[in-house]
Amino acid sequence: MNNGLKYPTFDVRLKKNKDKTYIFDAVRKKWLVMSPEEWVRQHVLHYLINVLKISASKIAIEKELQLNDLKKRFDIVVYNNTLTPLMIIECKAPYIQLDLNTVAQAKRYNLVLQAELLMITNGVSDLVLDKNNKEVLLESYFSAQE
């Protein structure tokens, strides 16, 4: 199945129920309503686990955080071996432009989480920044960590 994204294809599990399509999230072990953003999120998760070899136990998905008086929900956080946030990933639908607003959203979440890396992706392109706003290549970063 061609995913239309930059990430590798995988054995996507889909089902239809009435007028809705659902995708199976293997990390959370549940069916989720399919949306363009969820399509991207599932491909990113597959990439993290199967290509970068990050343990699913070190990944949190759509968890709430408190940002000042606001409750926000991040897309994906990858933790390091000491369970400190290593990377925040903000997923957008493929037709959403990655711009300063998207980066700012991830940076706001990082005020709370203090992760080493920020990643924004729409599945077609992505941007990964370190704490100094320097662009990072994920494959190089994670292969250097081994």
Image (cartoon, rainbow, N blue to C red):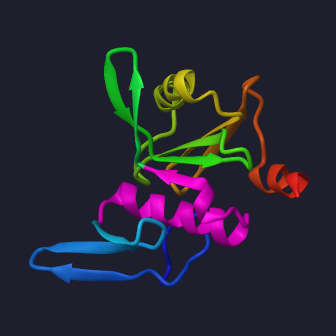
Left or right: where does residue 85 sit relative to residue 136?
Answer: left
Q: Which SS does the magenta portion mostly show?
A: helix
Quarter of the C terminus within the rendering: bottom right
Task: Tell me what residue is drawn at x 52 percent, y 31 percent.
Answer: 106
Magenta-colored stretch includes residue 47: yes
Residue 38 sits in which quadrant? bottom left
Q: Is residue 67 left or right of residue 20?
A: right
Which residue corresponds to the image point at 29% horizontal and 66% vertical from the top-left?
34
Where residue 88 sits: x, y (%)? 58, 40
Which portion, as a residue range, is magenta?
34-61
- At x 40%, y 48%, the residue is 62
Residue that lies at the very extreme toward the top in this rendered image: 68
Residue at the extreme front of the image, as rendered:
82
Horizontal arrangement in the rendering, residue 71 relative to residue 75 (left or right): left
Measured from the top left, where is residue 45 in percent x and y? 55, 63
Residue 108, relative to residue 130: is it above or below?
above
Where residue 92 appears, x then y in whole percent?
A: 43, 47
